[in-house]
Amino acid sequence: MGIIINRFPNGRKKALTLSYDDGVNQDKRLVSIFNKYDLKGTFNLNSGIQSENNYWINQGKTIRRMNIDEIEEVYKGHEIAIHSLTHPHLEDLPKEMLITEIFEDRKNLEKVFGYPVRGMAYPYGTYNEKVLDVMKICGVEYSRTVNSHEKVNLPENFLEWHPTCHHTNPRLMEITKNFIESEFRSMSLLYVWGHSYEFDVDENWELIQEFCETVSNNNSIWYATNIEIIDYLKALDNLRYSADCGIVYNPTAISLWISADEKSIEIKSGETVKIK
């Protein structure tokens, strides 16, 4: 029996996930582009200031948040995650305020969207051990940082999930094309993040259009939200193997995929499969 390697759904080796912050009006245009190319995004919102009255000017462009009664329809089909209640530097706050910023944002978003909100992105990308401790208490299962590494690795720590790159990275398309063209042995993840208002400020909506067109409609890539990636990776960790790895049992609620002797194998929910 050869080496057993985990795979994404349908035996794929590659996945793409996207993350955008702040719940601004420009998200409407971004979501429409994602929808056009059947891509999935995770959008990180600040429910305490989710109003058109909250806006700022950046290089002459108005950046205005959407009203909270708009967001359910705008983000349909995509994931919503926490970005804190009012977008402060979380590490500066006492623990009591930290709990409010994270837990109340989660509760507010769950009331709007009707499902458990389990992910987050750090406002300003800043955090410390105190923030990590509170996030665990508040039921946060992953959080995206702003520490891009230009790699396509899986996250080592879900609460410090470092993305591949920001969309303003001048190497974005080079990284993307290398990801598409490379033949990886292990599972690989391209994770791009940003703010949709930056396309207005930089006057380069054609960049995200080109990116989406380039990565879309590729059978070798699994297009997933952040939480779908996390749930799948956690489920893979729950596979149970016999001592000689010749038998595998899937106790989870979803189908999982592995590769043995370079052959893709599906292990359905509740199923026990003989690998050899």
Image (spheres, rainbow, N blue to C red):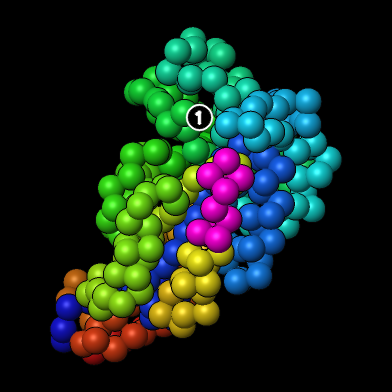
Task: Estimate the x, y position of residue 98 in percent, counting from the top left.
Answer: 53, 19
Q: Quadrant of residue 30?
A: bottom right
Q: In this rendering, does residue 159 appear at all?
A: no
Q: Is residue 220 above or below residue 196?
A: below
Q: How many marks?
A: 1
Magenta portion: prevailing SS class: helix
Q: Is residue 167 magenta?
A: no
Give the left or right position of residue 186, taking residue 130 as reference: left
Q: Quadrant of residue 256?
A: bottom left
Q: Is residue 201 magenta?
A: yes
Q: Residue at x 32, y 64 (%)?
A: 174
Using the image as rendered, state which of residue 245 and residue 201 is in the foreground.
Answer: 201
Q: Residue placed farthest to the top in the image?
A: 94
Q: Is residue 184 above or below residue 160?
A: below
Region in magenta: 199-208
Image quarter of the C terminus: bottom left
Using the image as rendered, state which of residue 142 and residue 206 is in the foreground.
Answer: 206
Q: Residue at x 78, y 31 (%)?
A: 52
Q: Is residue 62 above or below residue 164?
A: above
For label 1, the SS is helix
Task: Estimate the x, y position of residue 90 in percent, counting from the top left.
Answer: 48, 20
Q: Which residue does the numbered mark 1 point to in the structure image?
A: 123
Give the left or right position of residue 49, taking residue 70 as reference: left
Q: Residue at x 44, y 64 (%)?
A: 16
Q: Identify which amino acid the numbered label 1 is placed on.
A: Pro
Q: Residue at x 61, y 45 (%)?
A: 200
Give the left or right position of residue 1, taking residue 63 as reference: left
Task: Estimate the x, y position of residue 104 in percent, counting from the top left.
Answer: 66, 27
